[in-house]
Amino acid sequence: MDTTVKTHDITNSVTGGGLSAEGLQPFLHESCVTLYAPSFAISHEDGQIDGGADGFYHGDSRALALLTVAADGHAIAPVRGSFEGADRAAFRGVLRGLGEETPDPAVTLHRRRRVTPGRLEETLEVANAGRQHVRVRLIVTAATDLAPMERVKSGHAQNPVSAHVTESGLGWSGGAFSVRLTSSPRPAAVDPAAGRLAYDIELAPGSSWNAQLHCDAAHEDGDQFPAPPADSLPWRTPVLRSADRRFDHWLSQSAADLDRLRLTDPENPADQFLAAGAPWFLTLFGRDSLWAARMLLPLGTDLAAGTLRTLARRQGTKSDQDTEEQPGKILHEVRRATQNFDENFSLPPSYYGTVDATPLWITLLHDSWRWGLAPEQVEQLLPHAESALAWMRDHGDADGDGFLKYIDHTGRGLANQGWKDSGDSIRYRDGRFAASPIALCEVQAYAYEAARGGADLLRAFGRPGADRWEEWAERLRDRFRSHFWVEDEHGPYPAVALDRDKKPVDSVTSGFGQLLGTGLLNHEESALLAARLSAPDLDSGHGLRTLSSDSVAYNPYGYHIGSIWPHDTAIAVHGLVRAGFPEAAASLSAGLLTASSAFDARLPELFAGHGASTDARPSPYPASCRPQAWAAASSVMVLQSVLGLSADVPGGTLTVAPAFAEAYRPLKVEGLDIAGGRLDISVGADGTAHIEAPKGLVVKREHPTSR
């Protein structure tokens, strides 16, 4: 007897039938996500919600785990399903064999979905285009486990919660979370034990029947981070028309997704920030929210200001080993409750386990000031900037060697606390894991940029300490050059990190791209890295691999050891342009556009790193978030790089230097923002640039054919 089948458990629970994946993170790559933070829905491409991570979620809790539509006695064959914008989706199917006289379908189901904060709306339409009078019983089945997000993510099934009958549907409740599913018209029959709503439908030829389902979910104490008013968008929405329509589509879809990722700080609802992404990270994340806001600065400074203030209110004030809080430190993430993934991995509701959010906060404040954030708003945040600078010196560099580093003091938190925060991400070239404390190469670049930017702010606003932080930055620059650089058969390069013994962790990674343009490197060093980034082991043709394909540990499906992250590639594109290497930037940018087309312009958090030499279209990373804030915001950073945009509002100048716009011109973008004023830019087929900027700004055109 073949006993291997005994390793699989056949289940019909609310988490879906088929082979059990208990303890494995659910896959999402064939899912349709509709989003309006803090709520979202995940379904199959045919609209059915019935397995894995499928469900309707609100505020990190699953409100529905099952919502299916079936026709008694007839299979529903899917025809088409797709998301529309960010918060809507539509699905069409054929009721096979019903009312059919020819091979042509006669009776169809059109299922339309819309998500709003705290509500899932589904409209069901059954239409009879045939010549026969038909009857059918339509059955809607619903169930839930009310599972917290971390249980869904870790693949641990939970028992279904019993339903009770309401006036026009079903309801569920558990703890302080309640869910109600209502129907109009009322069903012909309701079976709470089976979670079924039944409708008896009779259709004459040419007629249709409609029903509306509403699922409302609420936490008793309200939303941790509520949705903002729909009309309070904290940026201008740009319109791009370019010679490459993929670029236009990518920017448009990204803007729609970013709109629906907005959340507010309940301590001041006027302050908005971007949730990191759906489904796993639909909350406040320091690093993600900061990078996304920085990428969107060409659209205005309001989002950046809201993000800065939201994080400043939660800036560390004490030392707490359980949460990793320290004075001046910017947090990693905020959740409603403790996340218990397993006995060895548990994160508190407010968790500070990140080494990079603090310098990134300082740099966002500096860059926002340069893009025109009102001086009084900047000045209000300077005490927080001074505390953040002090954290870099006093806590980020705990052993005084001059580098920012991290170690998990709790034994239950994140072993790696840079943006590549998976447990296996920091590896030697031969595949060995690096031991903590770890000093990451890109974090030293963040710290250098933060110290220089912090010094600029202190000096501009008449506060002491500017010279001291400039000197600190220069010492860091010198130490980086003497400690991080290593060499292989292709020449010198910076190690990804220094380990516990201050030895270089010598793998070749995408971290090169995040060093460029920060000021940490000189021109010769930048040229070496531009060449390395252009080589096929890193530049996959679909974007930048996180780890060289020549490395022992390379895995195209590795979360941070070979996959491609759009935001990481966009940062490299921007850094290459800032450092003066537009050709290398153009190649990486073209790869992202190819990938965006493959993902219907909604780039995921990450995707597989096989590359264009083997795959014309990139393969998904199956558990990737989509949409993800910094993946969507990458479209704006790439546009900024194509145009060579940089701002110095305090100095009264705007620079436009379209260094690699050839593939996209003629190009016209309307609705950028600088200092609260509208900015429109067009680049003609011959490279001639025309700029309409607010009065009072001197526009510097750094392009040989601009006028």
Image (cartoon, rainbow, N blue to C red):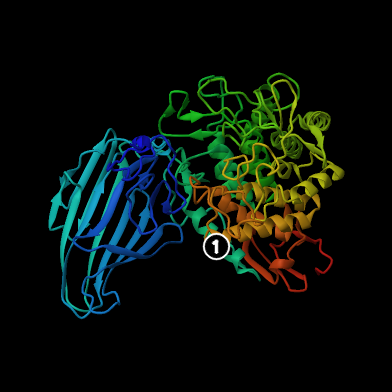
Query: Which residue of the protein is positioned furthest toward the front in this rendering?
Result: 1
* Within-10-Å neighbours for mark 1: few <14, some 14–19, many 20+: many
The residue located at (71%, 18%) in the rendering is 399
Q: Amino acid at mark 1?
A: Ser
Res 456 seen here: yes
Q: Along the horizontal axis of the image, is 390 left or right of 122?
A: right
Q: Nearer the viewer, residue 40 or 255?
A: 40
Label 1 SS? helix
- At which x and y percent is residue 123? 29, 62
- At which x and y percent is residue 65? 31, 45
**262 versus 660 height, above or below:** above
- At which x and y percent is residue 241? 62, 70
- At which x and y percent is residue 695? 71, 62
- The quarter of the displayed image where residue 433 is located: top right
Q: Along the horizontal axis of the image, is 54 left or right of 303?
A: left
Query: Which residue of the protein is positioned furthest toward the right in this rendering?
Result: 524
The residue located at (56%, 55%) in the rendering is 235
- The residue indicated by pointer 1 is 252
Q: Quadrant of the N terminus?
A: top left
